[in-house]
Image (tube, rainbow, N blue to C red):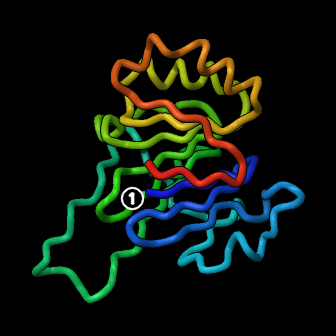
Amino acid sequence: MKLTWFGSSTFRVQTGGQVIALDPEGAPAGVDRSELVSGADRVVRAADSLVDVDPAIWRPRPTERLLDAADGLRPVEIWSVGPSGLLLDGDDDVPLLLLGGPVPELGRWVEKAAVVMFGADLAGRCHALLQGQAPGLVAVAGSDREIDAVFADIPNLLDGTGLIALEPGLAVEA
Protein backbone atom coordinates (compact mmCIF):
# COMPACT_ATOMS: atom_id res chain seq x y z
CA MET A 1 0.00 0.00 0.00
CA LYS A 2 1.22 3.46 -0.88
CA LEU A 3 -0.40 6.51 0.67
CA THR A 4 0.04 10.20 -0.10
CA TRP A 5 -1.72 12.93 1.87
CA PHE A 6 -2.08 16.32 0.20
CA GLY A 7 -3.89 18.17 2.98
CA SER A 8 -7.36 18.22 4.49
CA SER A 9 -9.17 15.04 3.31
CA THR A 10 -7.29 14.70 0.01
CA PHE A 11 -5.34 11.47 -0.44
CA ARG A 12 -3.95 9.34 -3.24
CA VAL A 13 -3.88 5.66 -2.32
CA GLN A 14 -2.37 2.71 -4.15
CA THR A 15 -3.88 -0.52 -2.86
CA GLY A 16 -4.87 -3.82 -4.42
CA GLY A 17 -2.89 -2.89 -7.55
CA GLN A 18 -5.08 0.17 -8.16
CA VAL A 19 -4.73 3.91 -7.66
CA ILE A 20 -7.56 5.78 -5.95
CA ALA A 21 -7.77 9.58 -5.61
CA LEU A 22 -9.84 10.67 -2.62
CA ASP A 23 -11.51 14.10 -2.43
CA PRO A 24 -9.39 15.87 -5.08
CA GLU A 25 -11.61 18.97 -4.87
CA GLY A 26 -10.58 19.38 -1.22
CA ALA A 27 -6.90 19.70 -2.08
CA PRO A 28 -5.22 22.85 -0.78
CA ALA A 29 -4.14 25.67 -3.08
CA GLY A 30 -0.99 24.79 -4.95
CA VAL A 31 -1.95 21.16 -5.55
CA ASP A 32 -2.75 20.49 -9.21
CA ARG A 33 -6.08 18.62 -9.07
CA SER A 34 -5.73 17.30 -12.61
CA GLU A 35 -2.36 15.79 -11.73
CA LEU A 36 -3.84 14.33 -8.54
CA VAL A 37 -6.45 12.35 -10.51
CA SER A 38 -4.19 11.59 -13.48
CA GLY A 39 -3.73 7.85 -13.84
CA ALA A 40 -6.18 7.06 -11.04
CA ASP A 41 -8.28 3.94 -11.52
CA ARG A 42 -11.00 5.52 -9.40
CA VAL A 43 -11.79 9.00 -8.09
CA VAL A 44 -13.92 9.32 -4.96
CA ARG A 45 -15.31 12.77 -4.32
CA ALA A 46 -16.67 14.07 -1.02
CA ALA A 47 -20.11 14.41 -2.61
CA ASP A 48 -20.16 10.78 -3.83
CA SER A 49 -22.78 8.55 -2.32
CA LEU A 50 -21.10 5.43 -0.98
CA VAL A 51 -22.66 2.48 0.77
CA ASP A 52 -22.46 2.81 4.56
CA VAL A 53 -20.85 -0.03 6.46
CA ASP A 54 -20.89 -0.87 10.16
CA PRO A 55 -17.18 -1.23 11.04
CA ALA A 56 -18.04 -3.24 14.17
CA ILE A 57 -19.29 -6.18 12.07
CA TRP A 58 -17.54 -5.63 8.73
CA ARG A 59 -14.96 -8.17 7.57
CA PRO A 60 -12.42 -8.01 4.76
CA ARG A 61 -13.45 -9.98 1.72
CA PRO A 62 -11.77 -13.36 1.38
CA THR A 63 -8.84 -13.76 -0.95
CA GLU A 64 -10.02 -14.71 -4.39
CA ARG A 65 -9.17 -18.28 -5.33
CA LEU A 66 -7.07 -18.69 -8.48
CA LEU A 67 -9.78 -20.93 -9.89
CA ASP A 68 -12.32 -18.08 -9.56
CA ALA A 69 -10.03 -15.22 -10.53
CA ALA A 70 -10.67 -13.38 -13.75
CA ASP A 71 -7.93 -11.93 -15.90
CA GLY A 72 -7.95 -8.56 -14.13
CA LEU A 73 -7.88 -7.35 -10.58
CA ARG A 74 -11.06 -7.12 -8.53
CA PRO A 75 -11.96 -3.50 -7.93
CA VAL A 76 -11.02 -2.07 -4.55
CA GLU A 77 -14.15 -1.94 -2.41
CA ILE A 78 -14.82 1.43 -0.77
CA TRP A 79 -17.42 2.10 1.92
CA SER A 80 -18.51 5.08 3.95
CA VAL A 81 -17.90 4.88 7.70
CA GLY A 82 -19.96 7.60 9.31
CA PRO A 83 -19.93 11.19 8.09
CA SER A 84 -16.17 11.51 7.59
CA GLY A 85 -14.67 8.05 7.24
CA LEU A 86 -13.81 5.70 4.39
CA LEU A 87 -12.90 2.02 4.45
CA LEU A 88 -10.92 0.56 1.55
CA ASP A 89 -10.41 -3.15 0.93
CA GLY A 90 -8.07 -4.12 -1.89
CA ASP A 91 -6.78 -7.57 -2.76
CA ASP A 92 -3.40 -8.54 -1.29
CA ASP A 93 -3.36 -5.55 1.06
CA VAL A 94 -4.49 -4.75 4.58
CA PRO A 95 -7.76 -2.85 5.03
CA LEU A 96 -7.32 0.92 5.10
CA LEU A 97 -9.55 3.06 7.32
CA LEU A 98 -9.43 6.84 6.88
CA LEU A 99 -11.07 8.74 9.74
CA GLY A 100 -11.70 12.47 9.78
CA GLY A 101 -14.16 12.32 12.67
CA PRO A 102 -15.05 10.30 15.77
CA VAL A 103 -13.71 6.78 16.16
CA PRO A 104 -16.53 4.29 15.70
CA GLU A 105 -16.71 0.85 17.28
CA LEU A 106 -14.40 -1.39 15.27
CA GLY A 107 -14.26 -5.15 14.82
CA ARG A 108 -11.25 -7.43 15.18
CA TRP A 109 -10.31 -6.81 11.55
CA VAL A 110 -8.70 -3.54 12.66
CA GLU A 111 -5.82 -5.47 14.28
CA LYS A 112 -4.41 -6.05 10.77
CA ALA A 113 -5.48 -2.70 9.33
CA ALA A 114 -3.86 0.64 8.67
CA VAL A 115 -5.79 3.57 10.12
CA VAL A 116 -5.24 7.13 8.92
CA MET A 117 -6.42 9.86 11.26
CA PHE A 118 -6.90 13.38 9.90
CA GLY A 119 -8.92 16.42 10.94
CA ALA A 120 -9.41 17.97 14.38
CA ASP A 121 -8.35 16.57 17.78
CA LEU A 122 -5.89 14.00 16.44
CA ALA A 123 -4.44 13.18 19.87
CA GLY A 124 -7.85 12.65 21.47
CA ARG A 125 -9.12 10.50 18.62
CA CYS A 126 -5.90 8.45 18.48
CA HIS A 127 -6.22 7.91 22.20
CA ALA A 128 -9.83 6.70 21.72
CA LEU A 129 -8.75 4.42 18.85
CA LEU A 130 -5.99 2.79 20.88
CA GLN A 131 -8.27 2.23 23.90
CA GLY A 132 -10.11 -0.36 21.79
CA GLN A 133 -8.42 -2.88 19.56
CA ALA A 134 -5.04 -1.74 18.34
CA PRO A 135 -4.52 -1.52 14.57
CA GLY A 136 -1.35 -2.65 12.87
CA LEU A 137 -0.51 0.92 11.89
CA VAL A 138 -1.76 4.40 12.76
CA ALA A 139 -0.85 7.25 10.41
CA VAL A 140 -1.65 10.81 11.47
CA ALA A 141 -2.11 13.72 9.08
CA GLY A 142 -2.27 17.22 10.50
CA SER A 143 -0.35 20.29 11.56
CA ASP A 144 3.00 20.03 13.31
CA ARG A 145 1.35 21.02 16.59
CA GLU A 146 -1.30 18.28 16.28
CA ILE A 147 1.32 15.68 15.32
CA ASP A 148 3.51 16.67 18.29
CA ALA A 149 0.50 16.26 20.60
CA VAL A 150 -0.12 12.74 19.25
CA PHE A 151 3.50 11.69 19.69
CA ALA A 152 3.52 13.11 23.22
CA ASP A 153 0.20 11.56 24.27
CA ILE A 154 -0.01 8.02 22.95
CA PRO A 155 3.35 6.18 22.92
CA ASN A 156 2.45 4.17 26.03
CA LEU A 157 -0.75 2.97 24.28
CA LEU A 158 0.88 1.65 21.11
CA ASP A 159 1.73 -1.88 22.32
CA GLY A 160 3.04 -3.08 18.96
CA THR A 161 1.07 -0.66 16.78
CA GLY A 162 3.19 1.31 14.33
CA LEU A 163 2.85 5.11 14.36
CA ILE A 164 3.83 7.44 11.52
CA ALA A 165 3.22 11.09 10.67
CA LEU A 166 2.19 11.98 7.12
CA GLU A 167 3.56 15.09 5.46
CA PRO A 168 1.69 16.80 2.63
CA GLY A 169 2.79 15.52 -0.76
CA LEU A 170 5.15 12.87 0.63
CA ALA A 171 4.27 9.28 -0.30
CA VAL A 172 4.60 6.59 2.35
CA GLU A 173 4.60 2.84 1.81
CA ALA A 174 2.89 0.91 4.56
> Residue 75, relative to residue 48: is it above or below?
below
Question: Residue 158's spot in the image, x, y percent?
Answer: 42, 20
> Residue 78, relative to residue 34: is it above or below?
above
Quadrant that contains the N terminus: bottom left
Frontmost residue, 166 versus 97: 166
Horizontal side, residue 133 vs residue 84: left or right: left
Q: Residue furthest left?
A: 67
Frontmost residue, 144 versus 69: 144
> Residue 164, relative to residue 76: is it above or below?
above
* SS state under label 1: strand
Residue name at image x 40 percent, y 34 percent: 106
Frontmost residue, 107 versus 114: 114
Question: Residue 75's spot in the image, x, y percent?
Answer: 40, 74
Horizontal side, residue 164 vs residue 30: left or right: left
Horizontal side, residue 167 vs residue 157: left or right: right
> Residue 96, relative to residue 161: is it above or below?
below
Residue name at image x 49 percent, y 64 percent: 14
Snapshot quadrant of residue 130: top left
Residue name at image x 73 percent, y 30 percent: 120
Question: Residue 94's spot in the image, x, y percent?
Answer: 35, 51
Q: Which residue is mark 1?
A: 89
